Image (cartoon, rainbow, N blue to C red):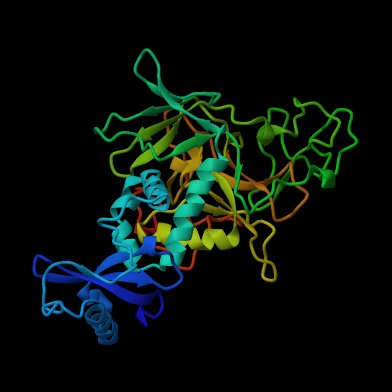
């Protein structure tokens, strides 16, 4: 018997109570331990009166001398069940509370609504996997500190990444954890360097892995959007200063995460950026495409998602294998806002993987960007690289205010 045949399978009703003239039943869920029991309002039974009749028969059988057992408004329970309101808090329940403490406030506030539209099994897996992600990232997370001028900054982010809010009193989200490198989930292994192809250059001229150069002498990009970037790798004999190692050397531009008036948090450049200059890599947790689909269902329900497919190697006959999720773990790129006329483009970059399905995602300046200007990307792509598309994509009003505004994001 189910409450909703697409989502919840009920083992039995194991208790009843009346609160504020409303009747609630204690549900034992099929396939779950008793600690997963929940109190559900009678209306949530969706007319499944057989469940109630089975419960009442068992209640009378267990309490033969209690004449009013079926009419009492006091709480009544069957034998050998678990009441989450009175039983001692278990280690699993404590763990679930810790999972919720690690989630962004918006997701916590909407959790009860999400649960009504989601499989309990999927929800449990979602929370456990996010918690596992934080465990995997231990040692990589950079703390948010304050300097003597009361400016917040991420320790270990070089050049600096500061955090400023001159708009309101909203604090920076404590659920977000800043990292300087990719975090590999328990289901994804780092690329194997044994399969990398080395270049034979003594002094690289940026043509060592392709017929045409990737970068100019000043490090700016020469590749058109839609083409991959092949950098030198750990198998090559050239030094770290090689002009063909731009992205792997890391960000060179100081950034500031700031509170905007209408778009939440955003990111601005703290110095001038040249056209074609590398700005930032999209960092987060590397997960499987299957896991990305699961997480996307939950993110979409609260109108937020930070999934980005490694989709350059994908095609009509080949699906995406890996996704980067910066929902809880990431860097400043997590806060890049959308614009229908963005100043950044995203490129697929290969430097530590010979697998065409595994590449880095790097943002380069589409044009000259002035100091203090907000950095933006197109959430709908515009080239061959696109943010992840989940089966339940949302449709959100655009606030970019550019002359080419499409009015909607993910239209």
Q: Position of residue 206 (x, y in %)?
A: 79, 36
* x and y percentages locating residue 92 in the rendered image: 42, 52
Q: Residue furthest left?
A: 21
Q: Which residue is at a point 28% across and 39% down the rendered structure image?
A: 261
82 displayed left or right of 377:
left
**Quadrant of the image occupied by residue 165:** top left
Instruction: Point out the residue furthest to the front here.
Output: 65
Question: Is 266 drawn above or below residue 22 in the view shown?
Answer: above
Q: Looking at the image, is 315 positioned above or below residue 207? A: below
- Quarter of the image with the C terminus in it: bottom left
> Could you tell whether 384 is left or right of 232 in the image?
left
Q: Quadrant of residue 48?
A: bottom left
Residue 369 vs residue 193: left or right? left
Question: Taking 254 as reference, is 190 above or below it?
Answer: below
Residue drawn at (76%, 27%), measured in percent from left and top? Answer: 240
Quick one: 33 or 370, which is closer to the camera? Answer: 33
- Residue 25 position, x and y percent, is 24, 71
Q: How many marks?
A: 0
**Where does residue 1 sit, x and y in percent of width and height?**
37, 83
Residue 202 visible in the snapshot:
yes
- Looking at the image, which residue is at 78% across and 37% down? 232
Looking at the image, which is closer to me, 136 or 237? 136
Q: Is residue 395 visible?
A: no
């Amino acid at each position: 018997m189910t409450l909703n045949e697409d989502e919840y399978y009920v083992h039995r009703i194991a208790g009843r109570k009346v609160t504020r003239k409303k009747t609630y039943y204690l549900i034992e869920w099929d396939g779950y331990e008793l600690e997963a029991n929940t109190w559900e309002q009678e209306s949530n039974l969706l007319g499944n009166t057989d469940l109630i009749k089975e419960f009442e028969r068992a209640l009378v059988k267990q309490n033969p001398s209690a004449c009013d057992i079926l009419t009492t408004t006091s709480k009544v329970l069957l034998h050998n069940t678990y009441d989450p309101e009175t039983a001692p808090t278990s280690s699993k329940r404590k763990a679930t509370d810790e999972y919720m403490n690690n989630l962004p406030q918006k997701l916590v506030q909407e959790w009860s609504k999400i649960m009504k539209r989601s499989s309990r099994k999927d929800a449990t897996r979602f929370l456990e996997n996010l918690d596992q992600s934080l465990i995997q990232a231990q040692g990589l997370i950079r703390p948010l500190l304050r300097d003597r001028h009361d400016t917040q900054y991420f320790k270990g982010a070089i050049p600096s990444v500061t955090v400023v809010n001159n708009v309101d009193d909203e604090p920076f989200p404590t659920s977000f954890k800043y990292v300087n490198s990719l975090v590999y989930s328990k289901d994804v292994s780092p690329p194997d360097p044994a399969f990398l192809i080395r270049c034979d250059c003594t002094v690289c001229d940026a043509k060592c892995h392709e017929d045409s150069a990737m970068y100019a002498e000043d490090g700016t990009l020469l590749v058109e959007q839609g083409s991959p970037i092949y950098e030198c790798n750990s198998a090559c004999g050239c030094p770290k200063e090689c002009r063909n190692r731009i992205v792997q050397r890391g960000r060179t531009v100081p950034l500031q995460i700031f509170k905007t008036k209408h778009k939440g948090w955003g990111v601005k450049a703290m110095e001038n950026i040249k056209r074609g200059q590398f700005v930032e890599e999209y960092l987060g947790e590397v997960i499987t495409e299957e896991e990305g689909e699961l997480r996307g269902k939950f993110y979409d329900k609260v109108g937020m998602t930070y999934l980005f497919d490694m989709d350059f190697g994908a095609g009509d006959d080949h699906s995406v294998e890996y996704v980067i999720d910066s929902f809880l773990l990431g860097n400043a790129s997590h806060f890049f806002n959308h614009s229908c006329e963005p100043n950044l483009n995203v490129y697929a970059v290969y430097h530590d993987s010979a697998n065409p399905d595994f590449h880095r995602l790097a943002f380069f300046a589409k044009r000259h960007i002035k100091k203090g200007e907000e950095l933006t990307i197109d959430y709908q792509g515009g080239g061959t690289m696109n943010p992840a598309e989940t089966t339940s994509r949302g449709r959100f009003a655009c606030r970019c205010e550019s002359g080419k505004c499409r009015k909607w994001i993910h239209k």
